[in-house]
Image (cartoon, rainbow, N blue to C red):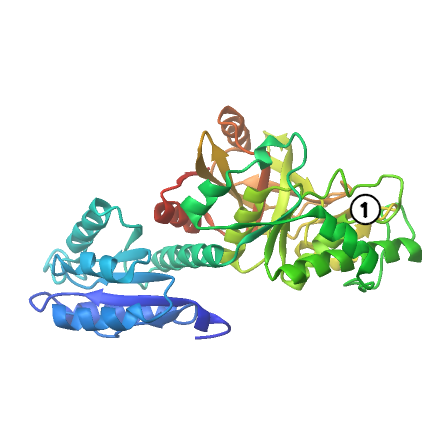
Amino acid sequence: MTGSNSAKKIGILCLGVPYFGLKEAQAFLNQTVGQLQDDFNLVGPRKVIIDRKTLLSALEKLRKEDLAAALVQIGTFPDGEAPALVAEHLNVPIVAHGLPEVNPTQEIATNSMCGLAMTVYTLRALNYPHTWVLGAPADPAVIFRLKSDLKGALALLGLRRNPIGLIGYRAPGFFPSAFDELLLRRRLGVAIEHIGLNEFTAALQTAPRRKARRDSFPTIEGGVLPAEVVERIERNYAALLAVLDKSSLHTFAMKDWPELFDADTPGGLWPALGWIQADGYTIAPEGDVSGAVTMALAQGVGDSPSFFCDISALDEPNSTLTLWHYGAPESLAKADDQIRYGSEGREVQFTLAPGQATLVRLGHDHGDLRILTIAVEVLDVPTRLGRASAVVRTTCTPAGQVMTHMLDHGWDHHVCLAYGDQTEAFRAIGKFTGISVESL
């Protein structure tokens, strides 16, 4: 176990019966633990459980742990009551893992796959939150799915325990940023704490100046920002930090305009929105609460900041989309020395680093929630659009079809770009919560 994984508790149970291949089941369990223990704090017995007394004892111990989920490995075809007992005793999302036969033409040693089918039927009949994975723990694709599903459960736990702060309300006319507070609480367990914009404007007058997280401020137009403009940005940064620190929250949506946008005064809030994320906060501009929830989930899955953005251009022949927005964390830049500031002290321009990524959005639709994921690759293409930006190529669905689908189904205009393949983790989040997921 490494890093902060002591907080990532996952219960693990391997179920079986004595008249199937316990030797094979134990070997699979050992392999699974070896593959997962560096990413999660696995809590539970390291032997196949073959009787109800042992299972109930293990469940009693696991109930005292602060679990995010339970990994139930079907070591062999299990006692039919065992999966239901796990669900009823632990009351956390379950990832059911079925195993292949070692030599299926010669022997059905474990009958695990059939046991998985019975387990999933039982959990579905009980309306119990679960996912399933079938395959050998030595298969990288299987381990990726297991890790993704467990990370999805961890992200949901983090969301339930950390309310979202809403500073002000949403930007006027931005109806996709509207939200149903009780629906979010009912379906995802996330609470919203309201903070008045007046707290920020008051902090502008009282908070001591906070030095920027950088020393140089080259401009898009050439030259560097004047000292008085940098000072004004730093005062916005200090005021925002004061409000966020006072709240004891980690994730926010903020109505940063039109009230806080002054086109006539150099030095604004937008650079501070990016800097603040290096201080451990997540913040969605324009009062987009569902955008903030999406960012929190993506960060819970991937442990790194995401890019809150617009999809602003389409190149169908090359299957690319152009993303851009303000308020992005500068840690996402391809190179620090390419970061430029607008001469007015509001815009921050840089190109995002290349790599595999996922566009994600949690949105409202006719009284319910839904999730969209789009698999993309951030290309190594320089952009000079005055803000943080990137050109991404869709990797599963042609970009033209992606946009057609989004427009046909009225998807929200803001999405979040998260590095890494998060499609499976969000699929699991959908299964755990009953929220529909569309993957493109």
Residue 267: where, in percent of width, then height?
Answer: 85, 49
Q: Is residue 394 left or right of residue 211?
A: left
The crowding category of the residue bearing disc 1, from other C-alpha atoms within 10 Å (few below 14, some 14 to 19, many at least 20), is many
Q: Is residue 123 left or right of residue 363?
A: left
Q: Secondary structure at mark 1?
A: loop
Q: Residue at x 54, y 26 (%)?
A: 407
Residue 437: where, in percent of width, then height?
Answer: 41, 40
Vertical placement of residue 400 versus 128, above or below:
above
Furthest residue in direction left, as rendered: 19
Q: Is residue 343 left or right of residue 438?
A: right
Most foreground residue, 217 or 357: 217
Is residue 319 visible in this depiction of the protein? Answer: no
Q: Residue at x 83, y 63 (%)?
A: 209
Is residue 117 visible in this depiction of the protein? Answer: yes
Instruction: Classify residue 233 by image quadrant.
Output: bottom right
Vertical placement of residue 211 versus 251, above or below:
below
Q: Is residue 75 left or right of residue 293?
A: left
Q: Residue at x 78, y 53 (%)?
A: 202
The mark tally for this picture is 1
Most foreground residue, 311 or 361: 361
Instruction: Classify residue 381 by image quadrant.
Output: top right
Furthest residue in direction top, as rendered: 408
Q: Quadrant of the N terminus?
A: bottom left
Instruction: Classify residue 97 by image quadrant.
Output: bottom left
Most foreground residue, 135 or 388: 388
Label 1 sits on residue: 346
Residue 102: where, in percent of width, then height?
Answer: 19, 62
Residue 251: where, in percent of width, then height?
Answer: 59, 54
Vertical placement of residue 102 versus 315, above or below:
below
Query: What residue type is disc 1 on?
Result: Arg
